[in-house]
Image: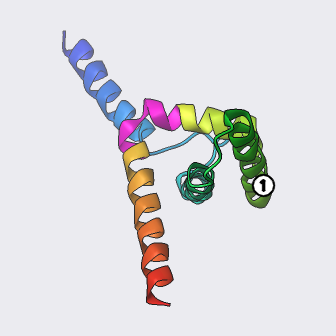
Amino acid sequence: MKLEIILFIILIFASCDSEKSVPSDLLQPEKMTEVLEDIYLSEGIVANSGSQDRAAERQMAIDYYSVVYKKHKVDSTVFRKSFDYYSMHPKLMQQIHEQVIDRLSKKNLELYKK
């Protein structure tokens, strides 16, 4: 019985550590923050393009995503796997989104100061 309790406690601590260590084949939190920041900026541009043509809007989004992936030297598959991973780890995803919001808010302030 004691062994089961000890194993349970070890398992709990191990699961807490897994929230903090991202597998090396995925985008690390700082890189994910940078990529998502540009993705969200791109989506904002597409959303405000005024296009009534959904196909053209979709193609514009694909083109912007390609530019973002190239800028950050990221493969779309790695981005998708990373996004899925962070979606399964809500605390990490929340931290990333908070950083993205902070960065975009700072950019917004700088833009309006000019």
Judge left or right: residue 5 versus residue 49: left
The boundaries of the magenta stretch are 85-92
Percent position of residue 111, x then y: 50, 81
Q: Please give the name of the residue rendered at 78% of the width and 47% of the height, measured from the top-left corner.
A: 63
Circle 1 Cα neighbour tier, 10 Å, few/some/many (<14 / 14–19 / ≥20): some
Q: Please give the name of the residue rendered at 63% of the width and 51% of the height, measured from the top-left corner.
A: 46
Residue 89 part of the magenta segment? yes
Q: Please give the name of the residue rendered at 46% of the width and 33% of the height, measured from the top-left corner.
A: 87
Percent position of residue 59, x then y: 76, 40
Task: Give the structural element (helix, strand or loop) at label 1.
Answer: helix
Which quadrant of the structure image shows residue 44?
bottom right
Percent position of residue 19, x then y: 41, 39
Percent position of residue 66, x then y: 78, 48
Residue 42 part of the magenta segment? no
Q: Is residue 28 above or below residue 3?
A: below
- The N terminus appears in which quarter of the rendering? top left
Residue at the disc numbered 1: 67
Q: According to the image, what is the colour scheme of the structure? A: rainbow
Q: Is residue 107 above or below residue 5?
A: below
Hey, what amino acid is under mark 1? Val
Q: Is residue 2 above or below residue 50?
A: above
